[in-house]
């Protein structure tokens, strides 16, 4: 929530930045032990989430991958989220590119929020033309 400045002429915007995202992701996924040691490091934390998605999909689980994708969707949809967050998803979710090669991965791709799928597919296309 935005905070009114002392002079009453403006607000201090509540921004969803690295610290807030890190706090939220650690609280949301406490079983992913690599998140806490990488607190406030967007790319390593996104890599941990991507690895968890792939490991779960390999095991035939769609629940955890979709929980992670829904969490990320909510974060990047926030109007006050810093652009570095979407960038970290695009760059550091590289392990998630393996999803189409797995039966459960295809299901996860189909069911994940459209904004997360868009970020992943756009980055995959960009990477393939380099």
Image: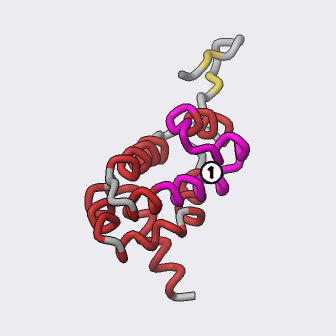
Q: Taking 85 as reference, is 20 above or below it?
A: above
Residue 91, given in percent of the width and then of the height, sits at 58, 66
Residue for point 70% across, 12% down: 7
Question: What secondary structure prevails in the magenta region?
Answer: helix
Q: Is residue 9 magenta?
A: no
User: At x 53% / y 63%, what residue is drawn?
Assistant: 93
Q: Is residue 87 above or below residue 102?
A: above
Q: Closer to the camera, 122 or 37?
A: 37
Q: Quadrant of residue 80?
A: top right
Q: Is residue 43 left or right of residue 64?
A: right
> Considering the image in quadrants, where does the C terminus appear?
bottom right
Q: Is residue 87 left or right of residue 120?
A: right
Tell me where residue 60 sits by quadrant: bottom left
Which segment is the magenta one?
27-52
> Is 26 placed above or below 120 here?
above
Q: Residue furthest bottom?
A: 129
- x%, y% of residue 53? 45, 57
Report crowding for label 1: few under 14, some 14 to 19, many 20 or more residues within 10 A (C-alpha). many
Secondary-structure class at tag 1: helix
Instruction: Answer with left or right where residue 80 lies relative to residue 117.
Output: right
Q: Position of residue 77 (x, y in %)?
A: 43, 45
What sort of colour scheme is used for the picture?
secondary structure
- Seen at 48% across and 47% down, the residue is 76
Residue 36 place in picture, x, y as percent? 68, 40
Residue depicted at 57% across the width and 22% down the height? 2
Give the left or right position of residue 61, taking residue 128 as reference.
left
Q: Which residue is mark 1?
A: 45
47 is within the stretch colored magenta: yes
């Amino acid at each position: 929530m935005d905070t009114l400045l002392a002079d009453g002429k403006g607000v201090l915007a509540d921004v969803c930045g690295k610290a807030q995202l890190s706090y939220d992701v650690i609280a949301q996924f406490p079983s992913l032990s690599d998140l806490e040691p990488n607190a406030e490091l967007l790319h390593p934390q996104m890599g941990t989430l991507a690895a968890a998605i792939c490991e779960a999909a390999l095991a035939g689980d769609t629940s955890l991958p979709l929980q992670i994708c829904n969490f990320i969707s909510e974060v990047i949809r926030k109007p006050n989220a810093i652009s570095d967050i979407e960038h970290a998803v695009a760059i550091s979710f590289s392990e998630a590119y393996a999803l189409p090669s797995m039966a459960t991965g295809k299901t996860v791709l189909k069911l994940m929020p459209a904004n997360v799928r868009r970020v992943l597919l756009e980055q995959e296309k960009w990477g393939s033309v380099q």
